[in-house]
């Protein structure tokens, strides 16, 4: 089992910045793939950005150019640096993870196996 703990949320004014962190721990025997999601347009988990098990990063169109995803593989920690925040970015942000079992490939999505508890971001 993998546990995910998010941190870094908070309240900022429009145009401000925040950095979210997601620390993974537990039974991590294979390469992790991780990502950030939030509810949007009726979808419970809509993509912001993810990094697959090959290290490739994908951003949604709404955050590309404003958000930067990075990972500290040594510490199994995912970061989301968010700039130029708008009120539309207000949401609970959830970290997701899967394992590339057997040395295979993974990328996260709404059906990912592991989820954090969420961290609130409020932009006013």
Image (spheres, rainbow, N blue to C red):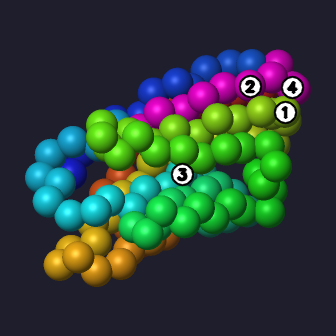
Residue range highlighted in magenta:
13-22
Q: Nearer the viewer, mark 4 or mark 1?
A: 1
| Marks 3 and 4, the one that precedes in the sequence | 4
Element under label 3? strand
Distance between mark 1 and mark 3 Cα atoms:
17 Å
Q: Position of residue 67 (x, y in %)?
A: 72, 44
The residue sitting at 15% across, 46% down in the picture is: 26
Neighbours of disc 2 within 10 Å: few (<14), some (14-19), many (20+): some
Viewer-side residue, 82 vs 114: 82
Q: Position of residue 51 (x, y in %)?
A: 51, 60
Q: On screen, 98 above or below 20? A: below
What residue is pinned by disc 2?
Answer: 17
Distance between mark 3 and mark 2 Cα atoms:
16 Å
What residue is pinned by disc 4?
Answer: 14
What residue is pinned by disc 1?
Answer: 84
Q: On screen, 37 above or below 112? A: above
| Marks 1 and 2, the one that precedes in the sequence | 2
| Marks 3 and 2, the one that precedes in the sequence | 2
Viewer-side residue, 105 vs 112: 105
52 relative position to 28: left or right: right
Q: In which quarter of the image is residue 41?
A: bottom right
Neighbours of disc 3 within 10 Å: few (<14), some (14-19), many (20+): many
Distance between mark 1 and mark 2 Cα atoms:
6 Å
- Say if mark 1 contacts mark 2, CB within 8 Å: yes
Neighbours of disc 1 within 10 Å: few (<14), some (14-19), many (20+): some
Element under label 4? loop
Neighbours of disc 4 within 10 Å: few (<14), some (14-19), many (20+): some
Distance between mark 4 and mark 1 Cα atoms:
7 Å
- Say if mark 3 contacts mark 4, CB within 8 Å: no
Distance between mark 2 and mark 4 Cα atoms:
9 Å
Q: Nearer the viewer, mark 2 or mark 4?
A: 2
Element under label 1? loop
């Amino acid at each position: 089992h993998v546990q995910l703990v998010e941190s870094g949320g908070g309240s900022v004014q429009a145009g401000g910045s925040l950095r979210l962190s997601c620390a993974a721990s537990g039974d991590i025997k294979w390469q992790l793939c991780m990502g950030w999601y939030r509810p949007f347009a009726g979808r419970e988990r809509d993509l912001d950005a993810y990094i697959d098990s090959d290290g490739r990063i994908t951003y949604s169109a709404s955050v590309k150019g404003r958000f930067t995803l990075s990972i500290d593989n040594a510490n199994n920690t995912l970061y989301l640096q968010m700039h130029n925040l708008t009120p539309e970015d207000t949401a609970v942000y959830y970290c997701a993870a899967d394992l590339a079992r057997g040395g295979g490939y993974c990328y996260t999505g709404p059906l990912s196996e592991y989820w954090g508890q969420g961290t609130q971001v409020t932009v006013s």
